[in-house]
Image (cartoon, coloured by chain):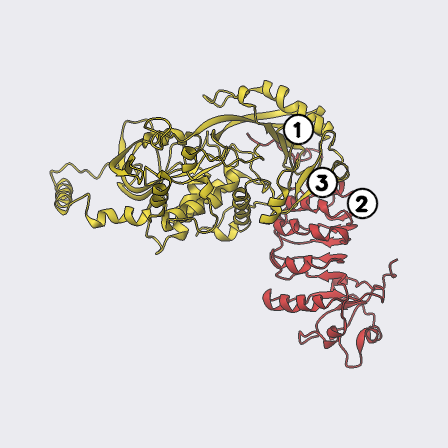
Chain colours: A red, B yellow
Amino acid sequence: MAAPRVPLHLMAPVWNRDTRGIHGLSKAVAPEGSRRKGRSLLQFLADHFYDVQALREYLLRKQVLKVHQKNRFQGKEWIRPNTRGRFSLDFLTFPEVPVEAVDASGSAINYHGLDNLLALKELQSLWLRRCPHVDDWCLSRLHPLANSLQELSLAGCPRISERGLACLHHLQNLRRLDISDLPAVSNPGLTQILVEEMLPNCEVLGADWTQGLGLGPEEQSQDAASPIPA
Amino acid sequence: MLRRSLQLALGRDVLGRGLGTHRGGSTLDWNGKMSEIKKKIQSVLPGGAWTQLHDTSYLPPEHSDVVIVGGGVMGLSVAYWLKRLERPRGAIRVLVVERDHTYSQASTVLSVGGIRQQFSVPENIQLSLFSIDFLRNINVRAKTSGGWGGDQSFSPERGAAQLARGIREQKQEGAKVCLMSPEQLRNKFPWINPEGVALASYGMEHEGWFDPWSLLQGLRRKVQSMGVLFCQGEVTRFVSSSSHAETPSGEEVTLKRVHEVHVKIDHSLEYQPVECAIVINAAGAWSGQIAELAGVGKGPPGTLQGTKLPVEPRKRYVYLWNCPQGPGLETPFVIDASGAYFRREGLGNNYLGGCSPTEEEEPDPENLEVDHEFFQDKVWPPLAQRVPAFESLKVRSAWAGYYDYNTFDQNGVVGPHPLVVNMYFATGFSGHGLQQAPAVGRAVAEMVLHGNFQTINLSPFLFNRFHLGEKVHEHNII
C-alpha cells in the first residue's frame, strides 16, 4: 500500500535546529511553490528504516566520486545535505533502514560507482538524470535490481543509446521508465515503441512516437530500419 | 626429452637476443656497414644513381624490429599492445604488413561480431572477459590525438542464450551467466519454443555483440598514432638462417631464425626486403601458408620438425533477413543446440544469423560466393523451429567469410614456434578470434617483451601441443 503522494518540498537548509530524529522532520516541512524545477518529493510509510550501508555508501561516494550534487536517500522524506554541504548527524540514527529511492541526478557516477547502488536490494526508485558518465554498459549492470526496481529515470543522459535500453529487459517490475531527451538514441520514436513492447507493464515516458517522422505531406515518414549494408 | 628442450627454448627472452644481434655485431661487420654507407653517399652525390623524383613511400622500411604479417584485428591488437607495453616509449619499430587494405576478405569485418564468455576452457573465458573490459574502456584507452571520431560505442547488448555446458567454470572465472529451465525460457522470452531444450544458459552481463569494423578502424587509427608503420603488400619470402641443436635425448633439430621478410608490392614485381628481429603470424585464414613459407612443417611427419601449423580457411555464411513479427529489442544473441545462431541488427527487425556446416558439408574455401540453398536447408529449419515467428521471413542479403580454422582442436595458437625461434603465432581461433583479440594481443606482446605470459597464462595454446597431441577441447564452438 502506498502512502498518498503529497508534494513535499523541503526548504533549504533542511535541517533546522529544532528537528530531532525522523519524526521531527515532518514538522519542519513547509509546502512551498515550485522548487527543484517543479519536482515533487514522495512520502513513504513510516515503517521504513535506513541501512547503515547507505551511510557508508554515501560517504564513499562523496569521497570517491566527488559528487557535487547531493545524493538523496529516502526514508520518510528525502535526505539531503544542508547549505554547507553536510548531512545531518541524524543519519546515524537510521540503522538497518533499507534505501528505497536514490536520486543521483547530475552526479559523476560511473560504471564502477554502480557497485554501491547494486547492493541496495530494496531499491524501488532510481533517478540517474543528466549523469554524464552513465552509458550503455552501466545499464547492463542494473539487472540485480530487477526484483525491486519500479521506477527508473534516465532522462538527459548523453551517453545512453538504444543498445543500453535493450538491457532494461531484465527489470520486469519496472512501472515507470523515463527515457526522454536521450541525445544518443538514433530514433527516439521507434525506440520508444520497441521499449514499450519489451516492457509491457511499464509506463514509458519519453519521446513521442511522432518524433522522427517527416514533417508535411510531401516528406515520407523516415524508415528507421535501413537494411544493413553487407 | 624433447619437451624439456622446448621449455628451455621458450624460457629465453627472445627479444633480448633478437634485438641485440646487430648491436653485438655478429651478422654485420663494421666494414660491411662502411661500404654500404659509402655506396649510399656515392649514389646521392651528383652523377650517382639516386634521384629524388621517385617516391618510395609505398615501400616498407628496410629495417623493422617487429613485422606483423596480417593487419586484421589480431595483428592490430598485437601492434597496439607492443607499443603500449614497450619500455621505454618508442623503443620498438613495428611494421604491419597487410595484403588488402580494403579488408574485403578479412575475417574481422565479415564476422557477426558476437562476444560471450560461455566457453568450457577457462583460458577462453578469461580472454573474453578481458576483451569485453577493453571494449568498454575503449574510448579512454584508445583515444588518439585527433579524438575518437564519430560514435564508436561498443555496448554489451544482450547475452547469448545457449544450452548449458560448463556453467560452473564460467561462474568461477567471473562470467555472469545463469541457467534457465524451459519454463523460465518461455516466461522470459515468449517468442522461443523451448521444445527439446533441456537447459539454457544466459549471460546477463558482458556479453552481446559489437561492430567489428568500428573496432578495426579505431585500433588502426590508434595504432598509427602510436607510431606503428603500415605497408600494403604481400609477404612472399622469409630469409632465415639455421643452426643445429641437439636435444638432451640426442635428436638433431634445426633451429631457424628469420632475418628478412620479403614484402611484395601489389600489382608489381617489386619487393622490399625488411630486416627484422621478430615476425608475428597474424594472417588469419592464410596463416598456414605464411607458416609454410617460414619453414614450419618441413620435415618428416611425426616429428616436431614436420608438424605443420594446422590452420586452414573455412568458409562460413552469414545471412541477413527481415522478419516483422520477429523477437523484439530484448533478443539476446541466440545460439541453438543445433549450431544455428542469430542476433538482432538495428532497430528494424532485421536479424543476422547462420550456422556452421558439418565436416562433410564444408564448402570450398576457394572464393567467398554465398550458397543460398544452405540457408534454406540448414539454417532456416532449426531457427524456425526454435523461434516460430521466423517461419515467415525474407532474406535481404548474405555474405561469406573465412574462419581461420584450427583443424586440430579449434582453439587459437598463441606464442612462439619452438624451432623457428622468432616467429610468434596469433591465429587459428576458428570463429572466436574477434572476441578474444584484445587479450590475445596483450598475451603475445608480453611473450615478445618479457618472454612469458604475465596476465593470462596461455601455455595450453602454444604450438607444442600439435606435436605432443594435447588437444585443448572446447565444447562451445559455433
Q: Is residue B135 left or right of residue A2?
A: left
Question: Badge 3 is on which residue?
Answer: B180
Q: Residues within 10 Å of mark 1 (few under 14, many from 20)?
A: many
Q: At label 3, which amino acid type do we have?
A: Met
Element type where label 3 sits in the image: strand
- Nearer the camera: disc 1 or disc 3: 3
Question: Badge 2 is on which residue?
Answer: A201
Q: Which one is in front, A121 or B343?
A: A121
Q: At label 1, which amino acid type do we have?
A: Asn
Question: Badge 1 is on which residue?
Answer: B322
Estimate the spatial distance between the alpha carbons at disc 1 and disc 3, rounded to whole Å.
28 Å
Query: Is B387 placed above or below B446 here?
Result: above
Q: Chain of mark 1?
A: B
Element type where label 1 sits in the image: strand
Q: Chain of mark 3?
A: B
Q: Earlier in the sequence, mark 1 or mark 3?
A: 3
Q: Residues within 10 Å of mark 3 (few under 14, many from 20)?
A: some
Residue B151 in sight in this render: no
Q: At label 2, which amino acid type do we have?
A: Asn
Question: Residue B36 location in percent, x, y?
Answer: 15, 42
- Tell me, yes or no, whether the two marked residues, 2 and 1, touch with CB atoms within 8 Å: no
Location of residue A227 (image quadrant)? top right
